[in-house]
Amino acid sequence: MALVKCGGGITDIRGTLAGQHFKRDRSGLHCSRMQRRVRSKTAAQAKQRNAFSKARKYTKDPRWVSYYIYLALNNIPFVFDAIVTGNIWPDLTGRYILVGEYDGENLYQGGAWNYLIFYKIESNKWYIASDTESPAGAMWIGNTTVEGIYEGIKPEYGDAHVKLQVQPPPVDYEIPRLKPAKL
């Protein structure tokens, strides 16, 4: 909404109307509608905005966001770890680190017992087991994607829940400080 005060001509113009702003002409008796200028983003600004959006998608922690922005700006792909939770026996919960590939898919290793999360192309399923050679002896069997619920082969083993999470920044990573402005 625009508010135009008049009194022997236009004395004051405030606000906008539908993205337009108004300007007094030289005589002061009339006002003209001016188009709103929209500045377009430069390629560098668009890249920075996309990097920030991508980083904030995974966390709100400033240290992690800073690290993810660094990765995104330098076109370094994010690496995901598998996080295993659930009330399972034996307790294999924890972070499973990406260690390589097996059967064309990611291979994760970790947890308290150093178990593996792997994919078998023959059965089109994911497994949690102590080794990749005996999926028949796997303790938990998943679906066709790494994320999801893995059912224990025995009821007392319980169900494991697996989700992917971006690897955290290295322990020695420091948030970059702004350089002081030159006078």
Image (cartoon, helix red, strand yellow):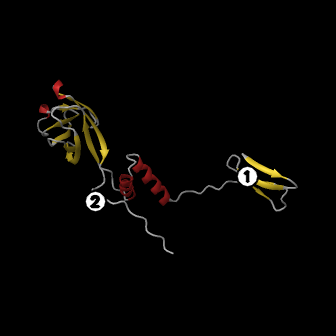
Left-right relation of 73 to 82: right
Q: Which residue is most to the right?
A: 8
Name the residue furthest bottom.
183
Q: Which residue is at 41% across, 48% downward?
A: 56
Q: Does residue 138 sit above or below 102 in this rendering?
A: above
Q: Secondary structure at mark 1?
A: strand
Where residue 18 sits in the image (x, y, percent)?
Answer: 69, 46
Q: Which label is found at residue 52?
A: none
Could you say which is closer to the camera, residue 68 or residue 37? 68
Kindly identify the residue that appears in the image at 43 percent across and 68 percent down. 179
Can residue 2 be seen?
Answer: yes
Q: Residue at x 67, y 54 (%)?
A: 36
- Give the image quarter of residue 152: top left
> Where does label 1 land, which residue?
14
Alpha carbon of mark 2 to alpha carbon of mark 1: how far? 52 Å
Q: Position of residue 75 (x, y in %)?
A: 36, 56
The disc at residue 172 is: 2
Q: Residues within 10 Å of mark 1 (few under 14, many from 20)?
A: few
- Dot 2 falls on a residue whose secondary structure is loop
Q: Is residue 26 above or below residue 60?
A: below
Q: Nearer the viewer, residue 142 or 123?
A: 142
**Amino acid type of disc 2?**
Asp
Q: Nearer the viewer, residue 140 or 13?
A: 13
Say whether disc 2 or disc 1 marks the residue closer to the N-terminus.
1
Can residue 105 be seen here? no
